Image (cartoon, rainbow, N blue to C red):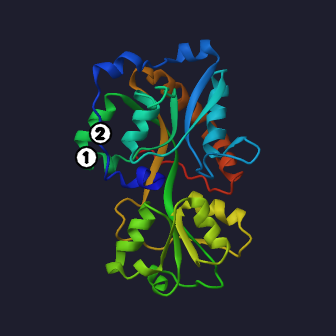
Amino acid sequence: MRVLTAVSSLRLAAVALGVAVASFAQARPLDDIVKSGYIDVAVYDDFAPFSWKDADGRYRGIDIDIAGELAKSIGVEMRVMMRQAGEDLDGDLRANIWRGDLVGRKMADVMMHVPQDRGLQEMQPGEVEKRNDLVHFCCKYHLQTFAEIVDPDEIDGKTFAQFVYKKIGVEVDTVPDFFLTSAFGGQLMNSVVRSVTFAKTMQSFEEGKVAAVMATKAQVEWMARNVTRKTKVVQYPTPDIIRKDWPIGLAVRTDSRDVGYAFELELEKLAASGRLKEIMADYGVTYTPVPVND
């Protein structure tokens, strides 16, 4: 559900803050984090190339490496909190930033890979204003978009029309899933092969069960580096998707926004030095800066 969480935001639930919540949800300002010697960072589980745990139990990914640079900039150890994606962004922010999970009420100091799409926020101002009472959105570090990975020996067209006859894979309940099953009058519905995880979608492509995969550009670029099948990354026109791209950044508690201010400055340095581009290139991903006015 990560792509749906990040882009569609059409099912964002209204957030209600109760007195009981305030009694245990205590944010940590920057000074407290520095004094403690560590920072808790929430990342999405099983979300290559941004965050995952490898076979040796090591945390890996673009978001892990960026968070490590941010922790180093304030002289503390990074402690990773790997969390599953919820039904929507509000649920993820509730679990990671302002209330904590249902078991231990454990909150993170910062959450990575938070979509910050002003256009979608303006479509639902009542819900966003409630979240903004609790969450400070900041530190945009990459502009995300959609793309497709194809086998050029099977696919040589320039539009989705060719998938009336060819199979295309998607992760279930994501924007690509909804787009491909409803666009063009539903003509592609029978060609869409859904998998419960992106890893399984990637496996379907590798095994030749589908001729292409639609996902975020970062995901398909990662795929291109990690499959043995012949590949080409393309971007077909998507007239029925309202938002073609969206920024991703960080979220912190509103009363810990000094953490966000510190990391905003550090991310500017990482971008200027080329370090952000280098981190993403390590995973085969093209770094796309967020426009200043986005």
* Rendered view: 124 above or below 162: above
Mark 1 belongs to which amino acid? Gln
* Rendered view: 87 above or below 211: above
* Rendered view: 107 above or below 290: above
Task: Report whether 74 appears left or right of 237.
Answer: right
What is the x, y in percent for residue 7? 41, 54
Front-most of 274 and 30?
A: 30
What is the x, y in percent for residue 25? 41, 21
Report crowding for label 1: few under 14, some 14 to 19, many 20 or more residues within 10 A (C-alpha): few
Give the label on residue 128, or none: 2
Task: Report whether 292 appears left or right of 127.
Answer: right
Quadrant of image for the N terminus: bottom left
| Residue furthest front in the image | 103
Tell me the residue that label 1 is attached to. Answer: 124
Is any part of residue 293 visible from this angle?
yes
Residue drawn at 40 percent across, 44 percent down: 89
